[in-house]
Image (cartoon, rainbow, N blue to C red):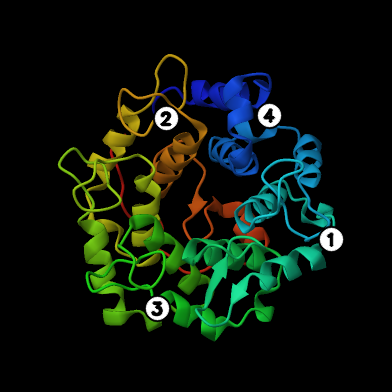
Amino acid sequence: MEGPSNLHIQHILRLSSKTTSLSYHLTTHLRLNGVYWGLAALELMSPGSSLLPAQDLVDFVRSCYDASSGGFGSFPGHDAHVLSTCSAVQVLAIKGRLEDLPDREATVAFILSLFNPVTGLLYGDRSRLEEDNRFLYCAVNALAHLSALDRLDKERAVQGVLSCVNFDGGFGRVQGAESHAAQAFTCLGILSILSSLDRLPYQGQRAAAWLSERQLPGGGLNGRPQKLEDVCYSWWVLSSLSILRKLDWIDGEKLRRFILSAQDPDLGGIADRPGNVSDVYHTFFGCAGLSLLGHEGLQPIDPVYAMPQRVVRELGMERPYQRALIKPSS
């Protein structure tokens, strides 16, 4: 990988050791998600993945388990949520330790209990105060890992996703919501996993056109019209175009340069844009975007599951997508 890849690895490892800092305690609501981002980034920068001991990760994931619901909270003692439950499954899958789920059946039941058959979408937790296709994607992703997709009402879920398609070709969180690139990823990911991409209006051409318009003159991608570019959209947009097999609808080389320009050359990590402070979220999604571009030195990532390709293959979950047809210069 061009740039300070070893510094990126050290940046992630430092985050895992700063357990007394204020920022550590202020971000417990994202802790299990952060573990997934960091571990997945290290996996892409192999052999960095071996630097986080498997048993330590398994122990932390299990400490986040909520026995009363069957799901996982973001931190020990936190209420279970489908976002952290998906991250728990992904972390265990990356380490080849899905058998260490405290109660697989209870976790599957927790996920399915959040499904709303009226809208075809999913609630985030048992409060049922918020639902959208982000949560449905996490459910479908996790159920695929757990070989339990057959227990989901797939047709109703597909209808729920299609209800989120907007006139401009983009996708909102729920029916009628503003189009956003992150929702393009969640909706297209769901349709891909459920083998229903052929149900998209205009065969996905309008969606691909809206996504391609997210590239700005500097090469970066934004999430909505009139917004600044952000490294994380190197994933949300690029993965969506990969699923639609339209990677060549943007300038991959310009995007590659933009992501690399957001690296911290002194302390490591990748920021949302050049000159800002790096963090584990943008470090993972920056590496993931570079991987999708076929950047040298990075392991391949599966754009449907946001997981290392080797894990998806080992679990037999692969879905079709465009495989790094853009060849950036070295």
Name which residue lies at 47% across and 16% down: 267
Give the residue type that dot 4 points to.
Leu
Identify the mark at residue 103; answer none if there is no mark.
Answer: 1
Q: In the figure, 152 relative to 59: above or below? A: below
The 10 Å Cα crowd at callout 4, few under 14, some 14 to 19, many 20 or more, is some
Dot 2 falls on a residue whose secondary structure is: loop
Dot 4 falls on a residue whose secondary structure is: helix
Q: Is residue 80 visible?
A: yes
Identify the mark at residue 239; answer none if there is no mark.
Answer: none
Mark 3 vs mark 2, CA separation in Å: 34 Å
Q: Nearer the viewer, mark 1 or mark 2?
A: 1
As drawn, is 51 to the left or to the right of 65? Answer: left
The residue singled out by tag 3 in the image is 162
- Which quadrant is home to the C terminus? top left
Q: Nearer the viewer, mark 3 or mark 4?
A: 3
Dot 3 falls on a residue whose secondary structure is: helix
As drawn, is 68 to the left or to the right of 211? Answer: right
